[in-house]
Image (cartoon, grey):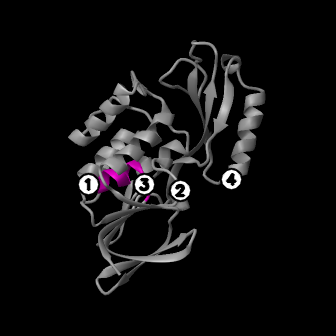
Amino acid sequence: MKVYEKIIFGATCYGIGAAWNAGPDTLILEPGIHPGGEFADAFDPGSAWNGPLQTGEARWFRACLEKRNALRNGAFHLPALIPLLSSMILENGIGIRLGQTVTSAIPENGVLRIRTAAPEGELEYLAFSYLDTLSVEHAAIRKKSFHAAISSDTDALPQAEGFQRGAFPGEGYFKMPLETSCTYPDARLRLENFWRTRPAELAAWTVTGSAMRFAVKLEKTARRIAPNHLCVFSGNYENPAAAFDAGVAGKEAS
């Protein structure tokens, strides 16, 4: 069995950044069907997009979004994230396997034996190091929210709490803070109930979709399980560019 230099769980913005210059002996295992799910599936457009970036790769990444008109004056068109990350993976030759949920990472004779649940059954991989960019411990959650994409025929921006504008006229996102114990069905029900009696500022806006996962922030971005087993939650960064920047720089990994 091939031994990878590094296996990364999650085709997240941080995970792709960590794999960017890592070479062919790095493999990303992604449980979903597309990259960037920590922001895209949570309907989280991020914040502080004009903040400083440490690496040239991250500045290029942000410039690509601006060139595509997906990033304007600090407002982000979230649907642009997945196509750009996908092209980055393909054009940079980053190894990736989709539909792979890591179930365990067990030390064994100087390497880690990583088991995954996949459509074809249980699979195993060997790696000298393992980087988990997706897993969340419930006890470590500091903030939790449920987001929705909203749209309107008007260009007027509401002053309602929880509203965040998108890059295009009539594009917006709504953030509903939750207690950490709230379940997904309850969150959807709360959004529906709130929207039925929403404030007048949001009367002209319509929900076009609700998030497939929660947006969460942890108490600590990184935790080290073992010398060769590191967890860095990509969703803890302010926006996709900041997460990619940290991954390329190896921030939190030292």
Q: N-terminal of the two: label 2 or label 3?
A: 3
Q: Nearer the viewer, mark 1 or mark 4?
A: 1
Which secondary structure, mark 1? loop
Which secondary structure, mark 2? loop
**Depth check, front residue: 216 or 38:** 38
Decide: is 54 above or below 149.
below
Is residue 149 highlighted in magenta?
Answer: no
Give the quarter of the image for residue 197: top right
Q: N-terminal of the two: label 1 or label 3?
A: 3
Which secondary structure, mark 4? loop
Task: Provide residue 30's location: percent of width, then percent of height.
Answer: 47, 59
- Cα separation between marks 1 and 2: 24 Å
Q: N-terminal of the two: label 1 or label 4?
A: 4
Q: N-terminal of the two: label 1 or label 2?
A: 2
Give the residues drawn in magenta, as a range.
10-21
> Which residue is rendered at x = 27% and y = 36% of the image?
60
Question: Is 145 placed left or right of 66 in the picture?
Answer: right
> Which residue is rendered at x = 56% and y = 24% of the image?
171
**Tag 1–tag 2 contact (CB < 8 Å):** no
Give the quarter of the image for residue 208: top right
- Cα separation between marks 1 and 3: 16 Å
Question: Is 59 placed left or right of 211 in the picture?
Answer: left
Task: Provide residue 66's location: percent of width, then percent of height.
Answer: 35, 27
Type of amino acid at the residue the image marks with label 3: Ala
Question: Is 105 placed left or right of 158 in the picture?
Answer: left
Specify whether residue 5 is in view.
yes
**Depth check, front residue: 247 or 219:** 247
Task: Provide residue 204's location: percent of width, then percent of height.
Answer: 69, 17
